[in-house]
Image (cartoon, grey):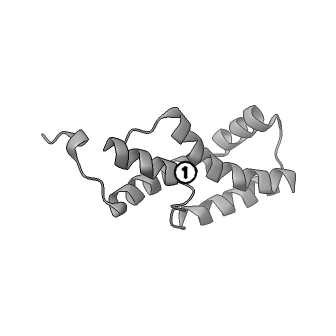
Amino acid sequence: MEDIKHTRWTDDTIAELILKVRNDLLKDFLDDRFLKTYVNEQFKIKELSHICVEFIRKDLKELLQTPVDMNHYRSLITHIRETDTASLSEGNEQLFYADVEKVLKRHIYE
């Protein structure tokens, strides 16, 4: 079995990994319960209107169809190249949540 530590990461492989992780997270947020719980915990908002939830879901679905913003994930890409591993540490996790939070804030605060 090949040791993942000795794998050479190409730009395409890194982009595919980031896209998969991002899209998996976006799919979690398409679940109303998950979305409402997260908004309650992170933004201290107890209730979202049905219309607000629908607009958030629409934007998240659109984001699922878009390519990854490689500049946004530059630090993670550099980390993967330098360590030659696909380790997603705590700090890198926030990069993925930042994509989601842009959508949430647009509908919660505007």
Is residue 6 something that shows in the picture?
A: yes
Quadrant where the C terminus is found in the figure: bottom right
Quadrant where the N terminus is found in the figure: top left
> Could you classify mark 1 by the number of other residues whose Cα lies within 10 Å: few (under 14), some (14-19), or many (20 or more)?
some
In x, y percent, where is residue 12? 35, 63
Q: Residue furthest left?
A: 1
In x, y percent, where is residue 47? 83, 40
In x, y percent, where is residue 58? 68, 63
Q: Which amino acid does label 1 sit on?
A: Lys
> Horizontal placement of 4 versus 65: left or right?
left
Is residue 85 something that shows in the picture?
A: no
Residue sitting nearer the eye, 54 or 16: 16
Residue plotted at (57% across, 56% down):
72
Residue plotted at (51% across, 66% down):
67
In x, y percent, where is residue 102? 71, 54
Q: Residue furthest front?
A: 82
> Horizontal placement of 18 versus 69: left or right?
left
Residue sitting nearer the eye, 21 or 32: 21
Residue plotted at (59% across, 41% down):
94
Q: For the image shown, how many numbered marks are present on the structure? A: 1
* Residue 13 to residue 82: above or below: below
Residue plotted at (80% across, 55% down):
107
Pointer 1: what residue? 27
Check disc 1 and report its element: helix, strand or loop: helix
Residue sitting nearer the eye, 92 or 103: 92
Residue sitting nearer the eye, 71 or 43: 71
> Horizontal placement of 61 versus 42: left or right?
left
